[in-house]
Amino acid sequence: MIDPIAPTPPKKPPSRVPVYLAAADTLAEQIADQPVGTRLPSEEELAKQLGISRLTARAALAALERRYLVRRRQGSGTFVSRRVDYLISRHHPPSWSQSVRSAGLTPDVRTTGWRLASPSPDVRRRMRIGPRRQVLALSRDRFIDNELVGFAESFFDTAVVPDLTQVLDPAASLYGVLADHYGLQPVRGWFGVAIDPAPPEVAEHLGLTGRPPVISIRSRTDAAARDHRPVELTVSWLRADVFRVEIDFDT
Amino acid sequence: MIDPIAPTPPKKPPSRVPVYLAAADTLAEQIADQPVGTRLPSEEELAKQLGISRLTARAALAALERRYLVRRRQGSGTFVSRRVDYLISRHHPPSWSQSVRSAGLTPDVRTTGWRLASPSPDVRRRMRIGPRRQVLALSRDRFIDNELVGFAESFFDTAVVPDLTQVLDPAASLYGVLADHYGLQPVRGWFGVAIDPAPPEVAEHLGLTGRPPVISIRSRTDAAARDHRPVELTVSWLRADVFRVEIDFDT
DNA sequence: CAGTGGTCTAGACCACAGT
DNA sequence: CTGTGGTCTAGACCACTGT
């Protein structure tokens, strides 16, 4: 037996709000209606307007950046921003380009090259590939409005998709090639998602300093036409300040 | 046709690493081996040791905090920390308490009370409940080592679990009551996960300043014994600096 | 009470983007 | 070149924790 919630919660003493957070809240309201890309006043300007030091103004802008409401570029300015919604669900398999276009932005995926590789034990296990077989590793960079915001490496079972490099066009859809050229009936077989501080190589590739959070998505495509044999495993990294990943799954 | 990756990547000029990031990396190495809870030197001490200003030492510690390697408590100090892994998968339904115990910590869930509520349209839709029916709302706080790190609100269809408040013990397992007392064969029917800046009410409840990121998990339990009718919907909030949620799903 | 982290100031120089 | 954000200093006061 448990008790109902009391209708009048106990009063709390209103703790003082720091100046930089108050300023952040004020600015957040002001930019709520403004379109993405609008430029905010400079730190110095803001400090003068609000009668605070530049460092305090800076702290306010940093707070907005942590809330994904603005993005800052050295030498350029502070700009209104929003994360791009990226939905992963059972029935709507994730389409990165589609998500970006839905946000009114321009996606671009550039295949940077391929190599034959001996995948990590983790990748081998997920793809059910023996300890000696090599796989084809394909690297792609993802851009929004010509800014690098993520990249991916895909590993292919060469026994299932021979001569892929001869067939694949840099601009082609992977799904389309697997479906049409190889007739594999590709389906999503597995996925994993987590958010972590960017590993050094990832931070370097994306041009990020410090170790800001990045989203890692691993997903495997199986061939329904080949007894659901794994065809491809993609490990992709996305800037967590650019994308809002939402998982929505029926079980 | 695409090209292989060149074996020698183009040289990059080694951009200068800021002092505070170098200090953060040094400290990160030092504390890598140290057990959770170990205290770091104070900001002033650190500044003196490294020959930098207190603000720079502070920036280094803030960088470590963003990487979830330390946590800081005003008036107390800076302590080595790690996030708790919280796995959500199809075959291992999430157990919060189990995840915390696996990390060697002490979980505690306290039911704070209940109320009859008219749920939001979103909750109604997910639970397939009509526009007028009320639901039973149950609030629970989650603690680790007596620190509040999350909370949840669960909504129950009173037509499926009548007199729940009479049956439920503050310490009881919800799953156990649904399975044993009501014989519902509870199964996970849906879930959704996202990370967002804490809404003001959530930040207040958790005692967080600014609007740090929090993890929101919505999950629905259905009754396999009642034609998979929805029984319960839980909306829970967890501190993103305390938990590392990983999704791992076969489809 | 002493010691800690949190906030805030005024000032300086640097790295970078755009003109 | 100018203007922007990024880093760094020395110093001050405050809020909070634990003794």
Image (cartoon, coloured by chain):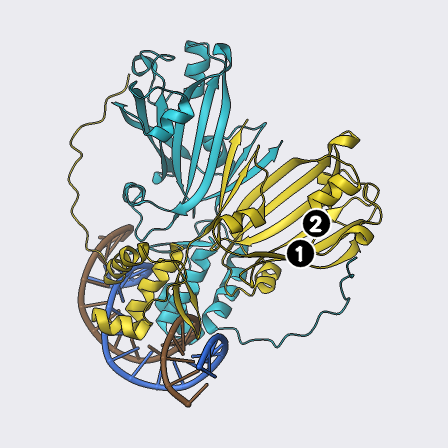
Chain colours: A cyan, B yellow, C brown, D blue
Helix, strand or loop at label 2? It is strand
Residue B140 got which mark? Answer: 1
Question: Percent x, y for residue A33?
Answer: 55, 54
Q: Could you say where residue B134 lies in the image, as x and y percent from the top left?
A: 82, 49
Q: How far apart are marks 2 and 1 (CA)?
A: 8 Å
Residue B154, disc? 2
Which chain does the numbered disc 1 sit on? B
Q: Whole-percent x and y of residue A113?
A: 27, 25
Classify the position of the C terminus of chain A by image quarter.
top right
A197 lies above or below A64: above
- Looking at the image, residue B57 sits to the left or right of residue A36; the answer is left
Q: Is residue B133 left or right of residue A211?
A: right
Q: Which of B172 and A187 is in front in this view?
A: B172
Same chain for the residues at labels 2 and 1, yes or no?
yes
Q: Residue at x 45, y 31 (%)?
A: A97
Compared to residue A168, the image places residue B134 above or below, namely below
Residue A121: x %, y % from top left: 34, 29
A60 to B244, vertically: above or below: below
Crowdedness of circle 2 by 10 Å Cα count: few (<14), some, many (20+)?
Answer: some
Q: Which chain does tag 2 point to?
A: B
Amino acid type, label 1: Arg
Pointers 2 and 1 in contact (C-beta within 8 Å):
yes
Return the disc, 2 or 1, that comes first in the chain's sequence: 1
Quadrant in the picture for the N terminus of chain A:
bottom right
Residue in view at x 67 percent, y 56 percent? B140
Residue shown at 47% from the left, 55% from the top: B241
Residue A224 vs A85, above or below: the answer is above
Is residue A156 visible in the rendered image? The answer is yes
Based on the displayed image, in which of its 4 quarters is residue B50 positioned? bottom left
Which secondary structure lies at badge 1?
A: strand
The residue positioned 50% from the left and 57% from the top of the image is: A31
Classify 10 Å Cα crowding around label 1: few (below 14), some (14-19), many (20 and above).
some
